Image: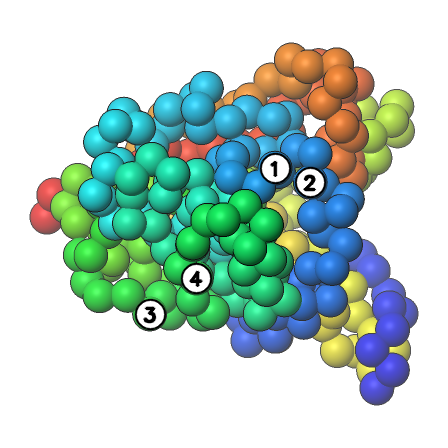
Amino acid sequence: MSGELSSAGYGHAGAGESVRASRSHWDGASATYLEDHGRTLGTDVLVWGPEGLTEDDARLLGDPAALAGAVVVEVGCGAGQGARWASARGARAVGVDLSAGMLARSRALDAATGARTPVLQADAGALPLADGCARVAFSAYGALPFTADAAGVMAEVHRVLVPGGRWVFSVSHPVRWAFPDDPGQRGLVADRSYFDRAPYVERDDAGQLLYAEHHRTAGDWVRLARGAGFALLDLVEPEWTREDQPTWGGWSALRGRLLPGTAVFVCERLRR
């Protein structure tokens, strides 16, 4: 096995191999990820997607003052920017991520900013947290796009939230999967079926999975949330409003004026 990229396209990716590939990929990408996207992500800002929508503007988690003293969990925290944002508002925040490399970036940002953000290394499908311990959980492009078992992640988040707890997560807008991942004119013409749920996968020359990103339709996400015991309160589709917002992969001002790039699902754990 060389570990070098040999093929890329759409195909199958199982639950176990998706977990292994995500851990390895993000460990390897952690050194350059913040260098590439730090202008958008910042150090202690909760940003819902490449469009630059922040929680300070959107207030999808509810009244920020109500976070004081609450246990708040960032699922798939990466370098912990969201958990750091919540801590600054008085929350008892913790970040959970599969990648040791990304958690090392979080500790480096803590050292640079003087913050102290508790983080745990764990699969989002097996959160090392007690039942009903948290009032708020959120995930900004963390974990859910990269897992084959999104239902398992939803169930875990439901388990750790108190009844009435808020669960907010952002993912690539499902409609984007019908278009090429291209920020230019080519990315404005659909070339795949929106209903084709095959994940995007990269494999090495031995067939081992290196990277997987899973596609669900908007209806799939709604059913996953409701099936786990959540009520859907809102679906936010951020617009690209700033011309100086940096291009990020297939996200750009050109596409953002015409197509939604991010979907943010605002949910509440049902009181049962």
| Amino acid tagged 3 | Pro
**Picture disc at residue 128:** 3
Q: Position of residue 95 (x, y in %)?
A: 43, 56
Figure quadrant of residue 141: top right
The answer to which quarter of the image holds residue 252 is: top right
Mark closest to the chain's N terminus, 1 or 4: 1
Q: CA–CA distance between discs 4 and 2?
A: 20 Å
Mark 2 touching mark 1, by CB under 8 A? Answer: yes
Q: Give above or below for 223 relative to 65.
A: below
- Considering depth in this image, is 165 or 57 the residue closer to the camera? 57
In the image, is residue 262 above or below residue 125?
Answer: above
Report the mark closest to the observer, 3 or 2.
2
Q: Amino acid at mark 4?
A: Val
- Please give the residue where the numbered disc 4 appears in the rendered image: 119
Residue at x-position 38% and y-position 24%: 59
Q: State which mark lies toward you, 4 or 3.
A: 4
User: Could you tell me if residue 175 is visible in this image?
Assistant: no
* Cα distance in 3D space between marks 4 and 3: 11 Å
- Screen quadrant of the N terminus: bottom right
Tell me whether the residue at label 3 lies in contact with that at label 2, contact meaning CB atoms closer than 8 angstroms: no
Earlier sequence position, callout 3 versus callout 2: 2
